[in-house]
Image (cartoon, rainbow, N blue to C red):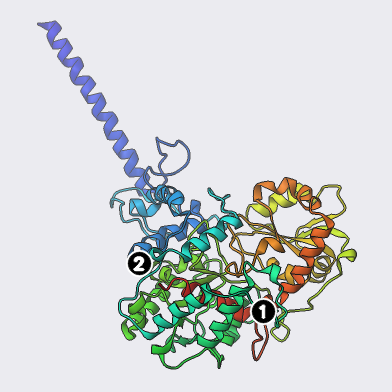
């Protein structure tokens, strides 16, 4: 009997000890909450995070785009096909399921909606937010594959949006399409166009002539300045293509119409750069207000006019050169013909629908093309040249491999002064156009204007005017993984081949020049507009 009482007493004592330990644990947790200390996660010792949450300072800018912009894509009535879509879908799904939004967490310094009121608060890191350098793409699309994607899209009716009701402009576009497809061999060129530059010179000339004869563009007057209808605010710098195209489009006598029922295209005249300057809150790491501003504008257009509703926006277009533009123009804008400097086929740029906008760095609006020209081939003593800030992941690899090499004909530098930069370009045979944070670079146009053969090191970059130009005839495309073999690739190009490529670069210059006042045939303005026209024509069945 005494033995039974003894065991009972010991059991009660053990229970009291467990109860005391639990009480101490509860008191400890409440003490942490009171003093707002960060508890240590058992699942990840020492990292200061709570399971199921993600620290805001670990979120890169590109990740932010995915978090708050990806849901908009579901609102679009039409999702254009892209040959990389299926490959990237699983990767995007994996990211979204691991993003703060998947757990119901807000971005930045906003409170988290899934937190229980008694859950300890997590102090916000004051670490300065650094721009993402991204990573190499999972899938690399070659320039040959891009050309095949273009042809495939333009021959498949399933890739186009049928209008909800008919219009005379649809018939005019179909007629133009048939005339282009049935083009006969062009006679001797009177415009000094050099046939080897183009996929098919006869088709290009016929399409261009039909654009001049047929195309009418309507510009909505809606939209507040300076984001809308103020090109003079963005006529210089690396985003100047937006301003120059807007200025020349809004002053065009040939292409504009005041009757929207006769319009083949509708131009949304906004600047993505001014949008960023005016609305982005510095260090907020959130662009929701920019996206909302553009979305509200489309809602206004939809509610005020019938034209967007007729085609669901597939005959509307805009030009945008800021890096953020692709992410900010998802959702309903995905139906538009998006003319983007950041033309990345590995993300959501749709070859055959969207248009690659040339990025032009303009120092003076009075002289937009600068001091073009350069040495003749025999006087170009430098094999390859690059200089620029170490943006992104490609340029550090380029400089680490080549800046300290003994080869004197490889001039690979960090940033240098502008005069030296131009002097090197004019003396070099090949100019390296390495991607920065995004796939695009103003060096592509600069190389052409200074007579230097472009060497494009930017996987999945869609070069401008792909619809008509045979880029491989006057430029070199080097995969990012081949940077260590760069010199070997360039010296393997025969001299005769290089001389011909240099000749073609000089011939193609006319397509990459702006002209103040009245645009000139085949110049940059007309080539951008032609790419938009061409893609619209070949998506009208």
Q: Is residue 52 above or below residue 332?
A: above
Question: Is residue 73 something one can see in this rendering?
Answer: yes
Residue 234 visible in the shown view: no
Q: x%, y% of residue 319? A: 53, 76
Q: Nearer the viewer, mark 2 or mark 1?
A: 1
In the image, 6 versus 467, the foreground residue is 467
Spot occupied by residue 92 in the image (x, y as percentages of width and height): 43, 51
Q: Secondary structure at mark 2?
A: loop
* Label 2 Cα crowd, 10 Å radius (few <14 / some 14-19 / many 20+): some
**Element carrying mark 1:** loop
Figure quadrant of residue 342: bottom right
Earlier-in-chain disc, 2 versus 1: 2
Q: Specify whether 505 is left or right of 31.
A: right
**Dot label at residue 386:** none
Task: Report the disc number at residue 187.
Answer: 1
Residue that appears at 22% across and 25% down: 16
- In which quadrant is the N terminus drawn? top left
Residue 339 image offset from top left, x and y in percent = 53, 72
Residue with the mark numbered 2: 76
Foreground of the two, 300 or 154: 154
Badge 1 density bin: few <14, some 14–19, many ≥20, Cα 10 Å: few
């Amino acid at each position: 009997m005494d033995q039974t009482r003894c065991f009972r007493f010991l059991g009660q004592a053990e229970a009291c000890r467990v109860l005391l330990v639990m009480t101490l644990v509860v008191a400890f947790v409440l003490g942490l909450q009171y003093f707002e200390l960060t508890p240590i996660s058992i699942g990840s010792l020492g990292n200061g995070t709570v399971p199921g949450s993600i620290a805001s300072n670990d979120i890169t800018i590109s990740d932010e785009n995915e978090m708050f912009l990806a849901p908009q894509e579901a609102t679009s009535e039409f999702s254009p096909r892209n040959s990389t879509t299926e490959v990237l879908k699983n990767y995007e799904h994996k990211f979204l399921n691991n993003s703060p939004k998947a757990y119901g967490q807000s971005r930045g310094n906003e409170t988290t909606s899934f937190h229980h009121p008694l859950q300890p608060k997590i102090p916000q890191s004051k670490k300065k937010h650094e721009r993402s350098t991204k990573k190499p793409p999972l899938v690399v699309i070659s320039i040959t594959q891009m050309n095949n994607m273009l042809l495939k899209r333009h021959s498949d009716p399933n890739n186009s949006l049928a209008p909800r009701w008919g219009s005379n402009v649809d018939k005019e576009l179909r007629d133009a399409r048939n005339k282009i497809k049935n083009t006969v061999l062009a006679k001797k060129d009177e415009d000094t166009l050099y046939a080897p530059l183009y996929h098919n010179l006869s088709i290009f000339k016929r399409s261009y002539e039909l654009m001049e004869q047929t195309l009418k563009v309507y510009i909505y007057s809606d939209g507040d300045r300076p984001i809308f209808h103020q090109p003079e605010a963005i006529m210089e710098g690396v985003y100047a293509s937006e301003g120059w195209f807007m200025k020349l489009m809004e002053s065009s006598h040939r292409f504009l119409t005041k009757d929207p029922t006769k319009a083949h295209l509708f131009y949304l005249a906004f600047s993505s750069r001014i949008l960023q300057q005016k609305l982005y809150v510095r260090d907020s790491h959130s662009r929701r207000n920019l996206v909302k501003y553009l979305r509200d504008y489309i809602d206004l257009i939809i509610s005020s006019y019938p034209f967007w509703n007729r085609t669901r926006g597939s005959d509307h277009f805009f030009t945008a050169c800021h890096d953020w533009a692709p992410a900010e123009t998802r959702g309903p804008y995905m139906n538009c013909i998006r003319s983007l400097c950041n033309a990345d086929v590995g993300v959501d740029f749709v070859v055959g629908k969207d248009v690659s906008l040339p990025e032009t760095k303009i120092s003076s609006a009075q002289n937009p093309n600068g001091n073009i020209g350069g040495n003749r081939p025999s006087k170009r003593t430098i094999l390859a040249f690059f200089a620029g800030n170490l943006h992104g992941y490609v340029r550090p690899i380029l400089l680490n491999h080549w800046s300290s090499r003994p080869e004197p004909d490889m001039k690979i530098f960090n940033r240098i002064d502008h005069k030296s930069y131009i002097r090197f370009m004019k003396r070099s045979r090949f100019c390296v156009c390495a991607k920065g944070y995004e796939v695009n670079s103003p060096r592509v146009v600069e190389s052409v204007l200074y007579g230097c053969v472009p060497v494009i090191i930017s996987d999945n970059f869609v070069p401008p005017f792909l619809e008509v130009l045979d880029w491989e005839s006057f430029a070199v495309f080097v995969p990012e993984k081949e940077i260590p073999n760069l010199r070997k690739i360039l010296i393997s190009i025969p001299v005769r081949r290089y001389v011909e490529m240099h000749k073609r670069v000089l011939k193609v210059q006319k397509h990459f020049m702006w002209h103040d006042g009245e645009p000139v045939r085949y110049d940059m303005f007309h080539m951008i507009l032609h790419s938009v026209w061409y893609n619209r024509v070949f998506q009208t069945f």
